Amino acid sequence: MSVTRRSLLTSTLAAGAAALTARKAMAQHAHGQPAPQQPPAPALKTPVATVKPPRLTVPNGSLLPWKTVGNVKVFHLRAEPIKHQIAPGLDIHAWGYNGSSPGPVIEATEGDRVRIYVTNGLPEPTAVHWHGLFVPNGMDGVMGLTQKGIPPGKTFKYEFVVDRPGTFMYHPHGDEMTQIALGMTGMIVVHPKGGERVKQRVRDFVLMTHEMKIPIGASRPDPMAMSDFNVLTFNGKSFPATQPLLAEVGDLVRIRLANLGPMDHHPIHLHGHAFELVATDGGPVPQGARFPETSTLVPVGTTRTIEFIAKLPGDWPLHCHMTHHVMNQMGHDVANIVGADMKGVDAKLNRVLPGYMTMGAAGMHEMATMQMPQPKNSISMVGGDGPYGVIDMGGMFTILKVRERGAFPEGNKLDGDKDPGWYKPPAGTVADEASADDLARDGIKL
């Protein structure tokens, strides 16, 4: 097709008119006038079903109860000192919400009007910020800026409409250094209005990371810590106390990760599957911007939602990939004795401490496997029992247990008796010692 001066002028004028119309529509929308309706999205080529929001699973946690008053969902949060167990052997005095740290998950649906009462049982003022939600300024929860602090013993009321679906958080915005460090965090999940359009069953998990510095034998986290955190958790628990995530082959697995820890980002890594980052607390990631990954960084103050189809049966680790973050209450201010000959030292120390044995000269694994007696209220280097021996990791470590279809017909009820136990792989599919015939066949010389 040839382009003439007349046709070029005509098309240019048409484009200019279209742009002017668009700018007027945007200006009207910005001044509160309704914007023109967008054309409908193209029909999906793959048949899908619209379903109710999947039931959230909060390993080691709970959902915040609510009731309907009129057309409003009413919740009640209590900020208070709590007693909390990180793992058997380590009990701490923390601050939390409704008796737990992190606090219970607030669940709502896009467009809901919510009314949240917050009662302050702390010895100092507090306020609650709805991290990532867009709320009226006076409901934003910043003590001294958008509201007065909630005095000890008083109850304040927050009310707003949850404007969009996604994964968000709540936390204090007053004396944040102390209150967040001592455990006052929580998550908010807002489902899309009208449900989801999916092709398979959805397993929807909620995991909040956190870090604390708890000196050996102490029961109070140190809110002044800026480094050397030695207790790392998923939903307030360190492995081996973390509950597993259960799924069947073919399930769409969604894991909502959140980080309100004081200082550290966490590269969360999944074995056995690749996933896509589908959303942050800022909103959904466009389809064209997604790509497969096996690790995702969860920076401080953010949420990251990942999704994948469960394909391979097995027991698959899910953990922070910072190696010191998968250790329990390890102290770092010690001498490096890896490779040192400590026999002479042991002989001399045994004269005053019979039975003393230096550990760590051949690596740290033995410190977990030998299960040495612990100081009171500590879990230093404690691991967990696995199907092939001790799993010598702790901290921010849990397990995704994928089984064949039909293994969990009643859904994902993490009530203790639904855990399927350890995966039993087919014969001949587990790494083991090479035989002499194997070595000879492949020309491996030792």
Image (tube, rainbow, N blue to C red):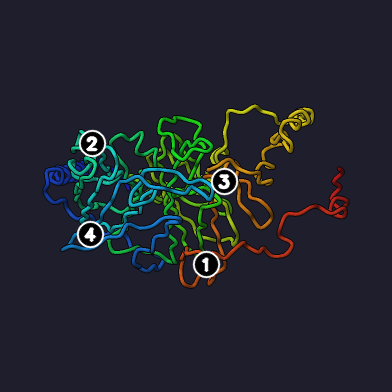
Residue 214 x/y as whole percent:
48, 37
Q: Amino acid at mark 3?
A: Gly
- Badge 2 density bin: few <14, some 14–19, many ≥20, Cα 10 Å: some
**Spatial distance from mark 3 to mark 1, Cα to Cα?**
23 Å
**Upstream in the sequence, badge 3 or badge 1?**
3
Residue 348 x/y as whole percent:
77, 28
**Upstream in the sequence, badge 4 or badge 2?**
4
Image mark for residue 417: 1
Q: Is residue 171 visible?
A: yes
Q: Amino acid at mark 2?
A: Met
Q: Are marks 1 and 4 in contact (CB under 8 Å)?
A: no
Q: Are marks 3 and 2 in contact (CB under 8 Å)?
A: no
**Spatial distance from mark 4 to mark 3, Cα to Cα?**
38 Å
- Badge 1 density bin: few <14, some 14–19, many ≥20, Cα 10 Å: few
Frontmost residue, 355 versus 415 = 355
* SS for dot 2: loop
Residue under label 2, please give it: 143
* SS for dot 1: loop
Q: Amino acid at mark 1?
A: Asp
**Eye-nearest disc, 1 or 4:** 1
Q: Amino acid at mark 4?
A: Lys
Residue under label 4, please give it: 73
Q: Give the residue at x 49% y 35%.
A: 229
**Upstream in the sequence, badge 3 or badge 2?**
2
* SS for dot 3: loop
Image mark for residue 183: none
Q: Is residue 68 left or right of residue 428?
A: left
Frontmost residue, 385 versus 2 = 385
**Upstream in the sequence, badge 1 or badge 4?**
4
Image mark for residue 394: 3
In the orientation shown, which residue stands out farthest toward the front? 352
Q: Give the residue at x 71% y 57%.
A: 430
